Image: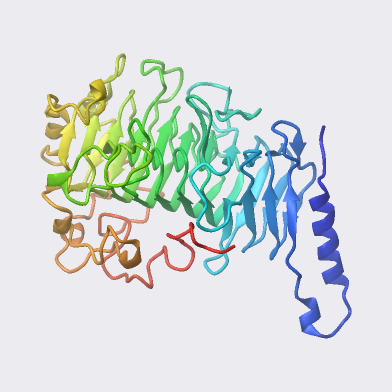
Amino acid sequence: MKANHILIVAAILACTLVACSDNNDKNDDTPVPQTLDLGDGSTDNFEITANTTLLYPNTYNLRGFVYVPAGVTLTIEPGVIIKGEKATRGTLVIERGGKINARGTRERPIIFTSAAAPGHRAPGDWGGLIILGKAPNNMGEQTIEGGVRSNHGGNDPADNSGVLSYLRVEFAGIEYSPDNEINGITLGSVGSGTTIDHVQVSRSGDDAFEWFGGTVNARYLVADGTWDDDFDTDNGFSGNIQFAVSIRDPLVGDKSASNALESDNNANASATPGNYTRPVFANLTLLGPVVNPAAYTDQAGVNGSTTGARFQAAFHLRRNTQLSLFNSLAAAYPIGLIIENDKGSTTRQWATDGLLNVNNCFIAGMVKNFQDAQAWANNSQWNDDDPGTFANAYFTRDGGGNRVLASLADLHLAGNPFSLSTLALFPAAGSPLVADGAAAWTHPLVTSGFEKVPYAGAFGPNETAESNWMTGWVNFDPQNTVY
């Protein structure tokens, strides 16, 4: 069945009553907050069938799978709160040809969060946000993972699925079935006409951000407390990402292997029916869970972990990816860089040929700097027999501009990267991120579409905790926030 839910009628009615009031008392013109349902709890039949606006200061209960089909735009006003229902796996799906116009502000971000009470929220409390487009991927038209009905993929690299700006997604991400998950934000074949900036994903039960093909660009992304990977690229994704941060909770992670940045071509590494996965990332700051590398042990079952959390690498490049990474830093992971030649893959050849690039990057305070194969071989913490010969030689090659630092302290970051209450990630005096961190912006992959800042990492040296781009809209304590 296709339905315009009662929330739409109620919201429009509420708006109409406010707009038509002829009472001159301004207090009477203030909208009265309402709590309204969005969706009917089903998984396959609730569609928003006409252009619809979710109104501030209302709160909306996201119930079941809610689809925005082709030809329909869902607009969300700044400050709107949407709470995902756990029992029905609340999930918002923007289908091919549909649009979302979610343009929050620094002062009033749009918030997708758990319906649970403060103190009782957890990763996977609801489904997540899925956006699907008509841009190319290298698998052809396909159904997005996560149990939804919807396909993605096409031949329009400039396809426009709308806007995500000043927006938070908290406690989303569920395993619909084994190896079939909904991420915090899933982007399937989303085109470059789409705008994505200032978006935070907190405590996702799977990846924070995952791109399946597409050409969309993004700036100012934050991932914190992610269960699996922070930034995951697959199926021929080729967008540009600049200024992104990930921060890990040592007690929250996948039972197999969690990475900060993971890049694949296809699950079958040798399958290349179209373009390779070749995104360009610049100015990342990726902070892992390893407070003390000398004393680090597998997190599963230690330090109070109840999740069996296991962490792997800051950068895990595999399955024929041709990803490029510039002017970035990663610290405090079990492994810094893995360049893995899976069966049928020539990832290392792409690195040798300059089709995979890691330039002007820093790794610091790792337990182990390099590895050439996946870490969790034979269910061990990592493969101690793998010296990472190729990854080491590649990262430290002449002309690459990369640096290996012994400790996180050698980065000279302001504040304490392991304390969210005193978090300050900008480079302090003497930081090599400024002295040695300016990439050669003349590289052909970064000559356009990037802000050519003279530092590595997501923040410049003249910023403060009060002035950086995370201030005002990012929330590192969603567990205790009263919505």
Foreground pick, 214 / 167: 167
Residue at position x 55%, y 33% in the image: 135
Indicate the position of residue 100 as horizontal and vertical percent values: 64, 48
Indicate the position of residue 147 as horizontal and vertical percent values: 60, 28
92 versus 465 height, above or below: above
Does residue 193 appear in the picture of this structure? yes
Horizontal relation, residue 470 to residue 386: left or right: right
Q: Which quadrant would the N terminus be assigned to in this image?
A: top right
457 versus 21 height, above or below: above
Q: Which quadrant would the C terminus be assigned to in this image?
A: bottom right
| Residue found at the very far bottom of the displayed protein | 25
Horizontal relation, residue 22 to residue 36: left or right: right
367 versus 320 height, above or below: below
What colour scheme does the image use?
A: rainbow
Indicate the position of residue 65 as horizontal and vertical percent values: 67, 37
Foreground pick, 211 / 36: 36
Residue at position x 49%, y 53% in the image: 199
Horizontal relation, residue 75 to residue 395: left or right: right
| Residue 50 lies in quadrant | top right
Residue at position x 12%, y 24% in the image: 385
Foreground pick, 414 / 284: 414
**Number of numbered markers:** 0
Foreground pick, 345 / 184: 184
Does residue 401 appear in the picture of this structure? no
Indicate the position of residue 300 as horizontal and vertical percent values: 30, 37
